[in-house]
Image: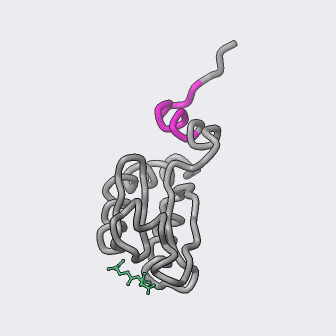
Amino acid sequence: MSFPRKGGGALVTQRLKMATNGAPKIKLYNASWCWYCRRVREKLEALHLPYEAVEVPVRHSERKEVIAISGQPEVPVLVDGETVLDDDDVIIPYLERTYGAQAAAGRKESLP
Ligand SMILES: N[C@@H](CCC(=O)N[C@@H](CS)C(=O)NCC(=O)O)C(=O)O
């Protein structure tokens, strides 16, 4: 069976992949009280990017996963496939560069 396709099939396919892939591809190590983390969460949400948020322990010494992944204990840490970033001033421009155009195209597509 075939379905009629609107223009922008690649975008539709991309959205379907995001919807059906199970776990989100982006993982954010963060703390609910952390302002830098909040900036990153707001950017992920503004770009409509699904992500898995991992709340880290308050104590540095207990942040073993963050240290293993990023080599340092501070949050936010963003993992996107092979890319691991550990500063909000690096993470936010990365998200804009990588996903900004996709989000803008999605907004245009949803206009009447
Ligand atoms: N340069 C980092 C600084 C991040 C930062 O200072 N994070 C704080 C939490 S808001 C942190 O993990 N501090 C260590 C701690 O929790 O004691 C950034 O801008 O993202």
Q: Which residue is drawn at 40% across and 59% down?
A: 69
Residue 15, above or below 37: above
User: From this viewpoint, which residue is outermost toward the top?
Assistant: 1
In front of the other: 93 or 46? 93
Provide residue 86's location: percent of width, then percent of height.
35, 68
Residue 41 shows in this picture:
yes
Range of magenta residues = 5-15
Provide residue 64's location: percent of width, then percent of height.
48, 68
Q: How many marks?
A: 0
Q: Residue at x 55, y 57 (%)?
A: 51
Residue 58, above or below 14: below
Instruction: Answer with left or right where residue 11 lies relative to residue 23.
Output: left
Point out the image quarter for the N terminus. top right
Provide residue 101's location: percent of width, then percent of height.
37, 51
Provide residue 70's location: percent of width, then percent of height.
36, 63
Q: Which residue is drawn at 61% across and 47% down?
A: 23
User: From this viewpoint, which residue is outermost toward the right?
Assistant: 1
Tell me if residue 6 is in the magenta stretch. yes
Magenta residues: mostly which secondary structure?
helix
According to the image, what is the colour scheme of the structure?
A: one colour
Tell me if residue 19 is in the magenta stretch. no
User: From this viewpoint, which residue is outermost toward the front?
Assistant: 61
Which quadrant of the figure shows ligand 1? bottom left
In front of the other: 82 or 37? 82
Residue 42 shows in this picture:
no
In front of the other: 42 or 2? 42
Q: Residue at x 57, y 65 (%)?
A: 53
